[in-house]
Image (cartoon, rainbow, N blue to C red):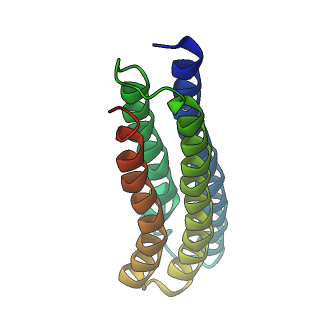
Amino acid sequence: MEEINVAMGIAGAVIALGLSAIGSSLGTGRAGASAVGAWKKCYAQGKPAPFILLSYVGAPITQTLYGMIVMFVMIGTATKESFLPGGGIAMLLIGVFSGLAMGLSAYFQGIVAAGAADSHAETGSGLANNMSAIGIVETVAIFVMVFTLIAAVRLAA
């Protein structure tokens, strides 16, 4: 097993996790700031602050979990004796692009969740529709995770 090949494979795995986590951080931060602002509006109007807004804030965190799953599978593949020669560069690229896609999904999910938090706090309704919109954005990350896993395991014959 060529060390540089394995090292690039592991680097790609860690990059997938890192980029997805960066997106989760940005997304939850964006949604969290909106939820805090929405709660402030509720307090100012003497309305109860809806606790359910935390579900919007936490939605983008799942992309970090997907990145972790991808990382574990990629590391497992990169450290197999059957890892293809030259597979390290492929794994590195897979890690960069899958992590970026999952991270962007989390970021944009945070934007949708921010709007949902503001809307829900103002109207007191819309949970099902809001979660549906958030879930559609989530689906991009799920697709990326699944297709990445399929591609990564193919690098070990």
From the viewer's perspective, is residue 85 above or below residue 31?
above
Tag count: 0
Residue 152, position as x, y percentages in the image: 41, 41
Q: Position of residue 10 (x, y in %)?
A: 52, 25
> Which residue is at the front of the view, 152 or 118?
152
Q: Is residue 69 above or below residue 72?
A: below
Residue 81, image quadrant:
top left
Residue 124 shows up from this direction? yes
Left or right for 152, reference 87: left
In the rendered image, residue 19, in percent from the top left (x then y), is placed at: 62, 43
Q: Answer above or below: position of 21 versus 5.
A: below
Q: Residue at x 57, y 47 (%)?
A: 99
The N terminus lies in quadrant: top left
> In the image, 119: left or right of 152?
right
The C terminus is located in which quarter? top left
Query: Where residue 75 sits: x, y (%)?
Result: 43, 26
Q: Is residue 21 visible?
A: no
**Which residue is most to the front?**
85
- In this orientation, which residue lies closer to the viewer: 61 or 85? 85
Query: Which residue occupies 66% across, 52% down?
Result: 26
Instruction: Say whether residue 111 is left or right of residue 87.
Output: right
Which residue is more in the foreground, 45 or 156?
156
Q: Residue at x 63, y 69 (%)?
A: 111
